[in-house]
């Protein structure tokens, strides 16, 4: 780690702590050349492997953009979308792998979106699962109703 003040190519770690609820490490560093201290925050890179085989960094913004399209015309605020994106990232990181297939990101979106807005969920699921008929929608609506009924009485369907 280069010193941001004198550009010396090395530094010494003085203190390390968890940050951002354990998803990052905050380190206090000292430069052996100029003696100044600075802070770094380290996070593990999470990569998404697309169907084509291309790998790209996970992006909460990309999750939000996709879900925002499904929520168009619905009363869903930015805070709810940010929370959903955080839930998706947490779920994907919990898998413990530095690379996850894009399919798993889509699956991680479906649960929180179903709880956020059922219409947006149906829109997203119809594209994600490639619905091809009215029967596909009918089946998904029946599943939604079953999920809602189970959660109304406190029974988990997951």
Image (tube, grey):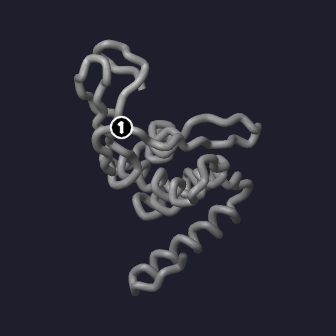
Point 57% across, 57% down: residue:
96
Point 58% across, 51% down: residue:
105
Q: Residues within 10 Å of mark 1 (few under 14, many from 20)?
A: some
- Front one among 51 and 117: 51
Q: Quadrant of the C terminus?
A: bottom right
**Image coordinates for residue 139, horizontal then vertical, percent:** 65, 69
Q: Is residue 156 left or right of residue 106?
A: left
> Visible in this render: residue 14?
yes
Q: Quadrant of residue 58?
A: top right
Instruction: Read off the residue under disc 1.
Output: 41
Point 76% across, 37% down: residue:
52
Q: Quadrant of the N terminus?
A: top left
Q: Is residue 20 left or right of residue 50?
A: left
- Front one among 122 and 97: 97
**Image coordinates for residue 148, horizontal then vertical, percent:** 46, 75
Q: Quadrant of residue 3?
A: top left
Q: Secondary structure at mark 1?
A: strand
Q: Residue furthest left?
A: 36
> Visible in this render: residue 109?
no
**Image coordinates for residue 97, horizontal then vertical, percent:** 60, 53
């Amino acid at each position: 780690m280069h010193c941001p003040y004198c550009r010396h190519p090395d530094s010494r770690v003085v203190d390390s702590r968890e940050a951002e609820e354990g998803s990052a490490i905050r380190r206090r560093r000292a430069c052996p050349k100029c003696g100044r201290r600075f802070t770094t925050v380290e996070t593990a890179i999470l990569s998404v492997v697309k169907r084509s085989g291309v790998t790209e960094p996970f992006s909460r913004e990309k999750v939000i953009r996709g879900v925002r399209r499904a929520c168009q015309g619905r009363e869903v605020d930015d805070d709810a979308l940010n929370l959903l994106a955080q839930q998706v990232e947490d779920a994907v990181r919990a898998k413990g792998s530095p690379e996850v297939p894009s399919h798993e990101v889509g699956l991680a979106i479906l649960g929180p979106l179903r709880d956020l807005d059922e219409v947006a969920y149906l829109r997203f699921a119809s594209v994600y699962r490639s619905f091809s008929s009215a029967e596909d929608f009918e089946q998904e609506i029946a599943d939604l109703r079953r999920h809602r009924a189970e959660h109304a009485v406190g029974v988990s369907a997951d």
